[in-house]
Amino acid sequence: MLEHRSFAILSVLLLTLVCFCAFGQEATVRASSPAPRTSTGAEVAILDSGYTRHYADLKAWVYSEEFIDATWLMSLLARSGISAAVISDHDIEVGALSSYKALILPATSCMSALAATQVEAFARAGGRVFSTYDTSLHDDFWRARTDYGLSSVMGVQYSSTGISSSDLIVPVAKSHPIFHGIELGVPVARTQGLINKVDSDAIILAKWSTGKPAVVETEYGIYCSENLFARENLEAPEAVMLIANIIDYLVNVKHDSRFNLGRLNIRATWYRPAAEEEQLRADVKRLADANFNIIFVDSFYDGYTVYPSSVGMQNPAFADFDPLAIAIDEGQRQGVQIHAWLETLCAGMASEGGSPPQIILNNPDWAAVGLDGHIPSAAESNRYFLSPAHPDVQEFMLILTLELVERYSVDGIHLDYLRYPYGRIIPYDYAPTITKLAVADLGFEPRDVRLNITKWNAWFDWRHCNLTDFVVRLSGAIRSAAPGTLISAAVYPYPEAVLTRMQDWKKWSEEECLDFVVVFTYTLSHDLLDTLTRAALDFAANNSRVIAAIDASSIPVAKAHEAIPALAEVVRATGASGVAIFSANILTEKALVSLKSGPFKASAPQEAWPQP
């Protein structure tokens, strides 16, 4: 018994001595750390962590196998024209990061609280961070933390560590710059099975084959849940390409930029009002409860207004009832913006008996006409359109819109169908009044253009410019009559919008006619939605906010509660300002709950809403 006790005492003494030596060694490292190294002109700082090296020794890991080969990485970056410097834990702790654009933390397992604070300050100041695996999960004395010290920068919270295996990083947003040149994914020879919970303000760029998040982007940088820099994983050329792409993106695109990542600040939906006040108020409330903040209330469709009008005809379904006024009142109660949705140039469908819409019956000369002489457009499900270039049509829409904004305190005007009918096969508009105007301006009859490319371009430009001039005039009138009223338009992806519908919303945005555009990015494919939305952002540049549209009517009801939030998450990953869902009338309670608990979880702050 005594022998066992003596052995136990000796073990404690030995352990104490080891800990003392280790602490002394660490203290020596700190005391002898070199002065901060700031490499003149270097854009990237690569951390070679002494704390993590000691941790590797403690765990009997081969550092060169598990952690960064700084020389290799500097050579890789140099081939991309990016200069880099190697820094130490001490350099970070004393705040020597300000000269760099990006910081690389390659599986930096151990990090002091002081260093974590400095990295956070660097990121908030515009510097960008690329971190991998268990970075900052231990402190500088190798003690495990319950969560990453840089959790707010990395955009994830630690949950657990699973089973090691090989796996594949599968891009969710394939058109993101970091996946340039990567077709199928990134094979990873060995993963540690790290399981994380993604923060609500972070976005998932790629997943593992199991569906768990692999690559995450935040406002501050990019995090990968596996140690991409391990020698075994670098044997895959796709992994090398991913590393190079991420660093290039952080340095040349994301550095010092303000991104809208993780914030769908605009959550809009199109809504055709109920014909009963109680139902209408209940609809507005249920949308507000789901964290929608803009409702496009259908106010002019099929040639009728929903409200009493001295300019247009009120839809008989709303006789003795003003749904727009009630929607505005309820919107103010619920804290949601109400925008009057005008289906501007769409006259509607023929009646069951085949008669044209009433507005066309009353004004036959207003109808847009195809080259083949047809008035309803076969390419538009046989809808009738008002002629966009007709002076009387333009004047009617101008007076109608002014009546609306002067009578109602709407938050915005949403212009839909502000375009020509789809004209790739049968172009429009060959209405008699329009061709006379064109002949006077162009000197030739549009029907005689045929294969004369010069004349065709002139005729195309005449229609396209005429519509743009009208948009400028309409926008100016709204801003003059009702300052502060937001103006938006529902548009098709660019440049198809111009080529097939004369809808040059890029020009409209440049002319400051619009406060935001809602782009018909209608698709169920996540990859295509990502591509269309990013293309719209590129075309809009900084001239207008971009809202991506989701067509809920094309999704089976049984799958809507999963599919709609998933599509919204794809939009969130692009950095678009928000989403608009068509339409509120078909959104089930289950879908609304999924939106509120998912991409709409955090209410968008009022200051992030569209402002005039």
Image: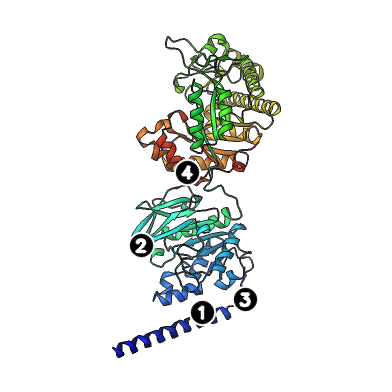
Q: Nearer the viewer, mark 1 or mark 3?
A: 1
If you read the primary sequence from the N terminus, does the residue marked by circle 4 or circle 1 appear first?
A: 1
Residue drawn 56% across the image and 78% down it: 30
Q: Where does the image place residue 297, in percent across and percent down from the top left?
A: 54, 27
Residue on which the image places disc 3:
35
Q: Where does the image place residue 313, in percent across and percent down from the top left?
A: 57, 13
Residue drawn 47% across the image and 9% down it: 355
Could you tell me which secondary element the residue under label 2 belongs to?
A: strand
Callout 3: 10 Å neighbours few (<14), some, many (20+)? Answer: few
Cβ–Cβ under 8 Å for marks 2 and 1 = no
Q: Nearer the viewer, mark 2 or mark 4?
A: 4
- Between 446 and 510, the one lying in front of the other is 510
If you read the primary sequence from the N terminus, does the residue marked by circle 1 or circle 3 appear first?
A: 1
Q: Nearer the viewer, mark 4 or mark 3?
A: 4
Could you tell me which secondary element the residue under label 3 belongs to?
A: loop
How many angstroms separate mark 3 from mark 2 (CA)?
38 Å
Callout 2: 10 Å neighbours few (<14), some, many (20+)? Answer: some
- In the picture, the disc for residue 189 is 2
- In the picture, the disc for residue 599 is 4
If you read the primary sequence from the N terminus, does the residue marked by circle 2 or circle 4 appear first?
A: 2
- Between 39 and 575, the one lying in front of the other is 575
Residue on which the image places disc 1:
26
Quadrant location, the N terminus? bottom left
Q: Amino acid at mark 3?
A: Ala
Q: Amino acid at mark 1?
A: Glu
How many angstroms separate mark 1 from mark 3 (CA)?
17 Å
Callout 4: 10 Å neighbours few (<14), some, many (20+)? Answer: many
Q: Nearer the viewer, mark 2 or mark 1?
A: 1
